[in-house]
Image (tube, rainbow, N blue to C red):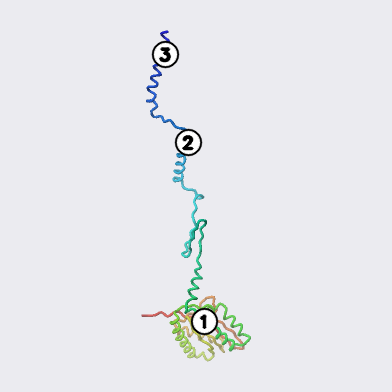
Amino acid sequence: MNKMAKFLAFGAVNILIGYAIYPIINKNMVIVDPQKNTKSSTYISAHQDVETTLTTPPSKSLIKVPTIRTQSNLKLVTNAHENKIIEPQANNTIHKEVYDNPDYEALSHWTTLHKEKLFETISTNVPENLADAMINVISENNSFLNSPQLVQDADIDENWAYITEQDLLNLIAQNPLSVDFNLLTLTCKQLTCEVFGSEKTKGIWHKIYWSLLQALPTLKKPDSSNERNSISFSDEGISYIYYKLKFSAEIKSY
């Protein structure tokens, strides 16, 4: 009986001691609510993903690099659905400005009249079997007759054309070889002079031309452009010459 009482008393003491020291032993323990644990895990997982994205070099497949057009005449138009790159009609604007220029309109009108007069002269002086063919060849790829350019101011050009025509007429007339060259027309406009004539001796005009190159410092030598600046048709020992002389602009000295 005494042993049983001692055993129960000892057990009761242990229980009291256990309750007394339990808070001390477990003061650093945190009771985790299962629902709160789920939220915490989700946050940690998301946080880890962010860190991984920042510290790991991004995959090329995940990066979209926009294509950049560097031309200054492009405009980017953005709406709610798509991006479009629109190229403005720059050439049309330029052409409109040129065509609206009174000087260009006057030049275009002059060219139309000049072409008619030139073709009439060819038809009158070249044998009928050659005239049409020569007119067709002269008309092809001829900017002077088809698409004249304003390369200098109209007032300056008018003065230049008059002086240059007189210089050429005098130089050709003074050349001893001119007795074998019949000058039919000479016209200057916008740094180009057009010569049409006939020669009795083949090659006479080219010799006269080379003499002009020596006498006129602004007269250009023949170039390798696609335009045909020299056209010749022959019939019964007479050659009919169409030639374009191109000049550079005079440099003003002060």
Q: CA distance from mark 1 to mark 2?
A: 88 Å
Q: Regarding mark 3 in the picture, which secondary structure is present there?
A: helix
Tell me whether circle 2 and circle 3 mark residues in contact (CB < 8 Å).
no
What number is the disc on residue 254? none
Q: CA distance from mark 2 to mark 3?
A: 45 Å
**Amino acid under disc 2:** Thr
As drawn, which residue projects farthest toward the front?
A: 80
| Label 2 vs 3, first from the N-terminus | 3
What number is the disc on residue 109? 1
User: Depth check: 205 or 140 in front?
Assistant: 140
In the image, residue 132 lies at what x, y percent? Answer: 61, 83
Say which residue appears at 42% left-offset and 80% top-offset. 250
Q: CA distance from mark 3 to mark 1?
A: 133 Å
Q: Residues within 10 Å of mark 2 (few under 14, many from 20)?
A: few
Quickly name the residue at label 3: 8
Q: Is 115 on the left-hand or right-hand side of 31?
A: right
In the image, residue 153 lies at what x, y percent? Answer: 44, 79
